[in-house]
Image: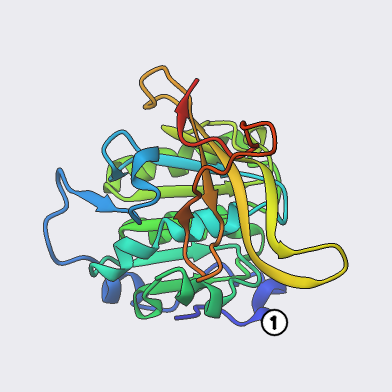
Amino acid sequence: MFAFRAGDAASPRSRELPVGLADRIRPTTPVAGRLLPVPPALAPLFPDGALRRGSTTTVAGLPGHGATTLALALLAAASQTGSWCAAVGLPDPGVVAAAELGIDLRRVVFVPHPGQGWAEVAGDLLPGVDVVLVRPPGRARQTAARHLVARARERQAALVVLVEHVSAWPEGGDLALSVGALAWEGVGRGHGHLQGRRAEVRVSGRRSAGRAVECSLWLPAPSGVVAAAEVEDGPDGAGPDDGPKAA
């Protein structure tokens, strides 16, 4: 479901949601104490093996490194189990790729062009959906970030924030996922085509129990889903792709 057209971005009223949207997608089951599932490959990154309602998770990574894929993948299992989700500020969400990640597009509201009111749009959606993914257009203002974190906690929705650098979200996150080194699969010297992207993901944050976890993930795998990358040894017996480890 797309809430706005691309041409709406310049409108001063572009942040306003369609009348009754939040009520139509508002969950009808109790939410207290519930966890929201994530794909199996991502469960080891979370202390509870799932997204906790009321929490904020940041996903940071440079363009092309798979951060958007990782952030969108956090919506997949939740949408499949009937939860409503929203994605705010992704100009080209790539619905085909999103479907390949396992996202139930019937349960997701896309607001690709919220304009300068991105924080207000995300805040308006938090009372009516289970997971809100938001991508600020740049470094977020402290007041906007603090408001969204508090609103997510109050409404018991999971907030996922996609940024290029961790410093772009001044409130930090309960969990912070950072996408680092990557390698493409399927391309040889002058031949082949891109099939999969393998990246190193590091997890830290207030709820990481004081330890940073690193793992290698396909973002995405050749099949289009996010998956754990197998350990592959290099010529010296210790390849660049070590398995999940705690730092």
Residue 194 in percent (x, y) is at 70, 68
Residue extending farthest to the top is 210
Q: Is residue 49 left or right of residue 115?
A: left
User: Could you say which quadrant of the image residue 44 lies in?
Assistant: top left
Q: Give me the residue at 46% from left, 35% from top.
A: 244
Residue extending farthest to the right is 190
Q: Residues within 10 Å of mark 1 (few under 14, many from 20)?
A: few
Residue 151 in percent (x, y) is at 37, 44
Query: Residue 195, relative to residue 163: is it above or below?
Result: below
Where disc 1 sits, the SS reads: helix
Q: Is residue 198 left or right of residue 19?
A: right
Q: What amino acid does circle 1 point to?
A: Gly
Residue 122 visible in the shown view = no
Considering depth in this image, is 79 or 239 the residue closer to the camera? 239
Considering depth in this image, is 121 or 177 the residue closer to the camera? 177
Residue 16 visible in the shown view = yes
Colouring: rainbow
Tell me the residue that label 1 is attached to: 7
Query: Residue 131, relative to residue 93: is it above or below?
Result: above
Residue 62 in percent (x, y) is at 71, 47
Q: Quadrant of the N terminus?
A: bottom left
Considering depth in this image, is 100 or 154 the residue closer to the camera? 100
Q: Give me the residue at 53% from left, 63% from top.
A: 221
Query: Residue 157, relative to residue 223: is it above or below?
Result: above
